[in-house]
Amino acid sequence: MTKIYPIGLILTFLLLGWARLPTFAQANCDEAAVIPEAEKRYATGNFDEVFALLNPCVEKGFSEYARVQAYKILSMTYLAIDSLPQSARSISQLLTLNPKFEPDFSASPRYKTLFQQVRESKEQILQVTSVSKKAENLLYVPATVAVLNSKDFAQRGYKSLEDILHDLPGFDVIRGNGIGSTNFYQRGYRSTSNDRTLILIDGVEENDLVSNTVLIAPQYPLSDIERVEVIYGPASTLYGANAFMGVINIITKNFRNLPGPAKQVAFNGHARSGALGRNQVDGVLTAKNADVALSVTGRVYQSGERDLSDYPEWNFDARTAGDYTGQLDQLGTDASGNYRAQQYLQRTNLTKLYPNSTSYKVDYAPDGKATALRLTPEGAQRAARLDNNLFGNTLNGNAVGFSNTKRDWFFRGKLEFKDLTISFLNWKTDEGGTPWYTNKSTISTEKNPRWVTQDRAFSITYNKAFTDKFQIMNISSYLLHEIKGSTNLVSYNGYYNGRLGFLELEKDSIPKATATYQYRISTQFRNELRLFWSPLFNLDVSGGIELRSGLIQGNYITSTLAFADETGSVANASGLAGGNNFKANDIGVYSQVTFRPLKDLKLVGGLRVDNNRIRSNGGYGTVATPRLAAIYNRGKVIFKAIYAEAFKDASFLQKYGTTATRRLPNPTLLPERVNNLEMSAYLQATKQLSFNVVGYYANYSNAVGTAQVMQENGSMTQQFQGIGRRRIWGLQGEGSYRSTRLNIWWNFTYTNPYDEDAKLRISDIADFMTNAGADYQLTPRLSFYLAGNYVSARKTGAGTAGSNNPSRRFDPFLVLKSNLTYHNLLNGLSLQLSVNNLLNKEYFVPGIREADNFTYASRFLMDRRILSLAVFYTLKPKESGPVTWNQ
């Protein structure tokens, strides 16, 4: 159903009308005439006339594009008269406006060297592109954003994308090391998978086409990443469905703009080896000339992971009688007050068929009813003997025992021209799934259970500035997401998990395990056209249209044989006609207006309308999402007030996926909704010291969950429905101190998540988290880094909403980590020694999903102390000599 937001539309028109008010500077600063004239005066050496033309207009009379050109001319002019500090300041102002700007090819080597030095020194002023889909000063974007760049990765010794999440505010990270590897809950929203945060690589989505989740495994390379931008809060106004809790945008390096000679070959990469057999090779090779750059990025990761057999829920050794205490017993009464023991005996005729058995014992009430049915020591030995046809034995020729090996790889080729980038991305993860489950729900071998995923993406990006006021960008992508046919989950019927009982024990029934292989494949074509227009110096208008067309698989193809794509089939679900593949079409139209009525005030209004259709009559229809923001600069303080809405489209798994206990699909499942209000204040106390604090309040509706419904035949089953409401508010803040030899960063998070329907706090979310780190340059070549992550106690299980965990609380923990890096040991070669969990603390985090400690593990063990050694190597041509300047 279409929803209209008159306030957003009215504001947009008001902004447009206000923006047309006359401005005094424009009359005397015609950039179309002034910029070319200044270029002529510079070329003829009339430097004073360059200053006279540009200085009066550069701050108040030019558009943003013209200001960039003016600062370029001014910086070259100051350099020509040997005024290096002023030239450096002009370059700095230029880079504040356009961080991707590069000197002309014909510029002097001296100017190029100074330009690069200024760029490297500008660490306090960061530019981001994720919020408005164009470059903006981080401090003035209409959203809360955190940014980490390639220098941070090297300094902090990050080994994977997951490591980054641990150091960010607002993320509860749950590394289960099983299917999906790592779950995270952004801003306190607990969910079954990573499906509420949108993840992009250079604007191309990584979220799975069927489940909307993203696989945070060690497959992603770090060597070619320029920076990672993290948006907090709803972002559907520009990104549409699924940018529900935020956006993580991985932005790779622009290799065409590598400093140095026009023609060059460069390499950047590392190899790391550590405990638990964790080995990785990660690098990018680049060849370029003045017109084109070709880069090839690759990563290979292998790990044996920790053997968890010492913990009871993951022990697959041969069973003993002691393992069966209370396992089969029928005790107490059911909800109707009937003795469970009596009902079992009536159902099975156990005492009549086996009256003299020594495997069980029955307690009777005075009225003759059985009140308890217990396993005897003899029965426990018998159950262990039978279960050991699985435990400590073999399954399909493979030894049964804990296994969780990982074999992941990533490949990307990228071809960059002036306005065009062509990319092909291909990655695969092959990981054990055992830690997610317990030994009461699965049997583990080297090959079972495993989750094997392969994603491919081909994209073409065109970015062209036609004039100083008008620019377009078009991204076309084709995605193919696949769950490989060797993917499998194992279930078993045995005495240890109670799926075989006393009657089967008397029959000496042998337990059996079944590996169910699964396959899934889906494709989507996507095209997004973005338009950027600056009609006035204080007005920017952006907008776009996004089209998607996909063929999405619903249920898995399953088989009891390997390669389910060749041997499997799909069981038709009740109420689901038309086959197992769904044609989905989406269209989204959006616009955002940015208006600066005053030098220190920025107003932003945006609106997006999305329409979704699945086949002919399915889909969520039409949804509108607005964003409003005001940013005000007062001296050293920047204030922001932001209101935004977003929606989460129910995944194809939720709409069409069925199981034995969830027989009904729900093709018309409506999206989840959120409205979010936040306010923030940023203080640049000194050039080195800054602080930022954010407060937010979010209301969520139509949260998807399972409900009991009646089928046409009168039987009951489960179905996904929109049944929940949540209210989450919190605080997050961060700060940094940067000096010549010492860099310090810190952040904190306070979260209060509440389920409005259950009237309970949401499970597994920490009240308080804080992270901090410091890097100290001991010598010009030797640096030391120390950081810590503190997470307060987490409430779970009874008394909370979302988890069936038998535990009630997970203890707080503090984990320290450090790196010692020797830079440039040889030409371009550096070494890094890393220690994670410096104090070797044993600690656990809550399990995911139901976390009932039967099907899903109730806890996950985190890494103890891990040492690793990395070798970094950078190959690049020699650059021009240094230029001395003081900014």
Image (cartoon, rainbow, N blue to C red):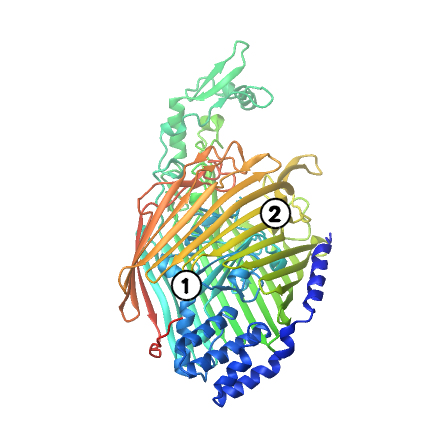
Q: Could you give the CA–CA distance between mark 1 and mark 2, rounded to whole angstroms?
A: 37 Å
| Residue drawn at the location 40% of the way across and 21% of the way down | 376
Q: Residues within 10 Å of mark 1 (few under 14, many from 20)?
A: some
Structural crowding at the residue carrying mark 2, measured as other residues with C-alpha within 10 Å and reported as few (<14), some (14–19) or many (≥20) = many
**Residue type at the position of mark 1:** Ser
Would residue 455 be found to the left or right of residue 262 on screen?
right
Residue, disc 2? 654
Q: Position of residue 724 (x, y in %)?
A: 62, 40
How many badges with numbers are in the image? Answer: 2
x and y percent of residue 278 in the render?
34, 54
**Residue 119: in sight, yes or no?**
yes
Depth check: give the residue in front, 727 or 47: 47
**Residue in the foreground of this view, choosing between 326 and 690:** 690
Left or right of 522 in this view: 308: left
* Residue at 49% in and 26% down: 503
The relative height of residue 296 versus residue 435 in the rendered view (above or below) is below
Image position, residue 288 (x, y; %): 43, 78
Between disc 1 and disc 2, whose residue precedes?
1
Q: Evaluate if marks 1 and 2 touch, with contact meaning CB atoms under 8 Å apart.
A: no
Asked whether residue 213 appears in the rendered view, the answer is no
Kindly identify which numbered label has been placed on residue 535: none
Of residue 857 and residue 167, the one placed in the foreground of this image is 167
Whether residue 638 is situated above or below residue 753 in the rendered picture: below
Amino acid tagged 2: Gln
- Quadrant in the rendering for residue 429: bottom left
**SS under mark 2:** helix
The residue at the far bottom in this view is 44
Q: What residue lies at 49% left-to-right and 79% top-to-bottom? A: 74
Horizontal and vertical percent position of residue 311: 36, 37
Residue at position x 31%, y 44% in the image: 840
User: Which quarter of the figure has residue 141?
Assistant: bottom right
* Residue matched to label 1: 150
